[in-house]
Image: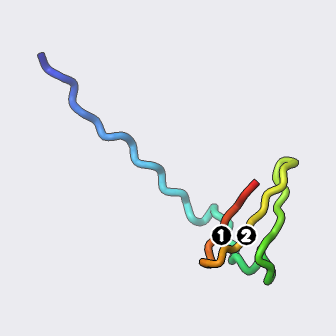
Amino acid sequence: MNSPPKTTPPANPVPNNSNILRLESGEILRGANTVEIEHAGQRYLLRVTRENKLILTK
């Protein structure tokens, strides 16, 4: 019995960088370590860790 040829899943499309808004973290944080962001009626915290990484929590 012949099995159908294996197909590779489609690759994720690469976003067009001209459509992506890019901000420096300093523009958002303005010298603070934590910023509160409101989105769709929910509040989120964006904070900088001791390792200088960003974490977004609800």
- Residue 58 placement (x, y as % from top left): 76, 53
- Residue 51, by quadrant, is bottom right
Image quadrant in which you'd find residue 49:
bottom right
Q: Which residue of the protein is positioned furthest toward the left in this rendering?
A: 1
Residue 43 rendering spot, x and y as whole percentages: 84, 55
Q: Are marks 1 and 2 in contact (CB under 8 Å)?
A: yes
39 shown above or below 35: above
**For this rendering, which residue is in front, 39 or 14?**
39
Q: Describe residue 22's horizontal placement relative to residue 13 as left or right.
A: right
Q: Is residue 8 above or below residue 47?
A: above
- Mark 2: which secondary structure? strand
Q: Residue at x 55, y 60 (%)?
A: 16
**Image quadrant occupied by the N terminus:** top left
What residue sits right under mark 1 in the picture? Answer: 54
Q: Position of residue 45 (x, y in %)?
A: 78, 62
Q: Residue at x 48, y 56 (%)?
A: 14
Counting other residues with Cα less than 10 Å from the Cα at mark 2, is it few (<14), some (14-19), or many (20 or more)? some
Report the residue at 57% width, 65% height from top: 17
Along the viewing direction, whichever of 51 and 36 lies nearer the viewer:
51
In the displayed image of the protein, which residue is found farthest to the top? Answer: 1
Q: Which residue is mark 2?
A: 47
Mark identifier at residue 14: none
Specify the amino acid type for callout 1.
Leu
Quarter holding residue 29: bottom right
Give the number of marks. 2
Element type at mark 1: strand
Q: Is residue 3 left or right of residue 49?
A: left
In this rendering, the answer to whether 7 lies above or below 24 is above
Please name the colour scheme applied to the rendered image: rainbow
| Separation of marks 1 and 2 at Cα, in angstroms | 6 Å
| Number of other residues with Cα within 10 Å of mark 1, as a class: few under 14, some 14 to 19, many 20 or more | some
Which amino acid, by three-letter code, is at mark 2? Arg
